[in-house]
Image (cartoon, rainbow, N blue to C red):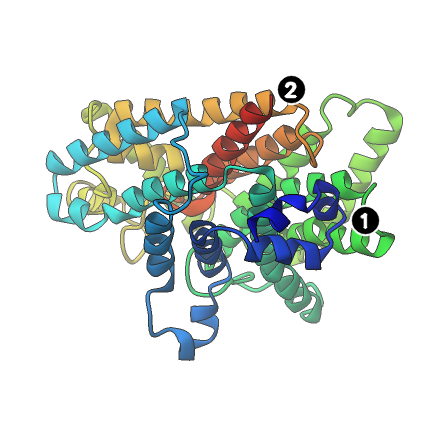
Amino acid sequence: MRKKVREIADEDFYSLKIGRMWQYFKGESFAFWMICVYLFFEYVRPQSIYPAIDFLPWTQLALIGAFFGCFADRTVRWVSSPVNVLLIIFLIVILLSSVFSYFPSVSYGKLDNYYLWVIIYFLIINIINTRKRFFIFLCIFFLASFKLSLSLAITWAKRGFGFTDWGLMGPEGFFQNSGELAIQMLVFWPIAWVFAHSLKPYVSKIWYRLLMLMPITAVMVILGSSSRGGQIALAVQLVFMNYKVVFKPKVLVSLLVSIFLIWTFLPDAQKERFDSMGEDRTSRQRIIYLENGLEMIKDNPILGVGYFNFAPYFARYYPEDLLVDRVELPHNIFIQVGTDAGLIGLFIFISMLILAVIKARDIDKGAIYFIKNIGLGLNISLLGFTVAGQFVTVAYYPFLWIHLSLLVALTNIVKKSD
């Protein structure tokens, strides 16, 4: 079987010949199967959509299977990267912050919010070690995201592109809230855009149009969500994507038309939310979170107030500044990390973001196989996460950690092929 797998040409993948791709997948290792199963259950969440199958911890079982499968997969070799070091140091800082936190029991109860991503990251970068494996893994990521974007874009269209307070919501899990859902679409659409354009020479017109539905429906979901942060991030992504040629008449006109259409599609109620930014109760509370979060970091610069201690610390020391029913998380990834792990943790976190940008640019220089400008797509995704992350608390959601794992896995594949 392994011999047959090797005979499948790259062009069969780029042409999206499903039968050939399935033949390859069947001949792959158990570890690869399990890491793909993990991604499917984490992103599609069928166990949430169909409660009848929610009788086992599917994602945990898939990760355990992937871990033990590594020992039987002879292709798995340890992948070295500066990102690895930063992730481990960040974990150590979080552990120290938990020990010395104001509310240690809160910190200990949340440790799995980060250390599980470290485990998942190392499984992905070591198992996804060939371009065919990467292609299939990326396709699963696309299909899972596209399932969300297509169904929710249709839902929004059935509403007459109208506005609701809750926006659009995904299945129970990381993407249920409209703000987190919008970030997943911000991460998804730039890579999907690059993917579709890169495969255009290999696929039929019908396939190409289907591929283009991925970024189009993702942008629709961002517009249909009630997330102002997500919509601002989308605008920043579009400007960044075209900044080199933005002043060329054709590009400038196209960009202005796109912005006009986006603004036209926004419901009136959503436009009113932009008009009230900084004045409504939600905005004022988040500004207070920001101000008091900076004060917390200033007073506790080394390790912060403690991992996930922002809410109980705020409730104890700033009760007079609460405008809502209960204290929430700080709605800003940098304030979240700074209060969780101090300036040390914040420096490491920002270093990971910067290193990710540099690594993505290096991939472009390596003229990666089936995707031209993949580094640009990854960096636009990261930009969307970072900008939207100024409005929501998503430092320990899958966005950054899956992004880093894909990036390091691909960097390793490029390096092996040189």
Q: Quadrant of residue 159?
A: bottom right
- Residue 365 badge: 2
Residue 284 in the image, given as x and y percentages of width and height: 40, 43
The answer to which of marks 1 and 2 sits earlier in the sequence is 1
Is disc 1 in contact with disc 2, using a CB cutoff of under 8 Å?
no
Q: Picture coordinates of residue 85 (x, y %)?
A: 33, 25
Number of the label disc, if any, that sits on residue 92: none
- Provide the secondary structure element on which disc 1 rests: loop
For residue 153, which quarter of the picture?
Answer: bottom right
Q: Position of residue 7 (x, y in %)?
A: 67, 45
SS type, badge 2? helix
Q: Nearer the viewer, residue 201 or 132?
A: 132
Which of the 4 image quadrants contains residue 125?
Answer: top left
Residue under the image location 59 percent in, 22 percent down: 361
* 412 up-or-down from 218: above or below: above
Q: CA distance from mark 1 to mark 2?
A: 25 Å
The amino acid beneath tag 1 is Val
- The residue nearer to you, when weighing 90 against 19, is 19
Q: Residue at x 64, y 29 (%)?
A: 376
Q: Can residue 265 be seen?
A: yes
Which x, y percent locates residue 188? 59, 46
45 up-or-down from 101: above or below: below
**What is the number of the mark on residue 203?**
1
- Quarter of the picture holding the C terminus: top right
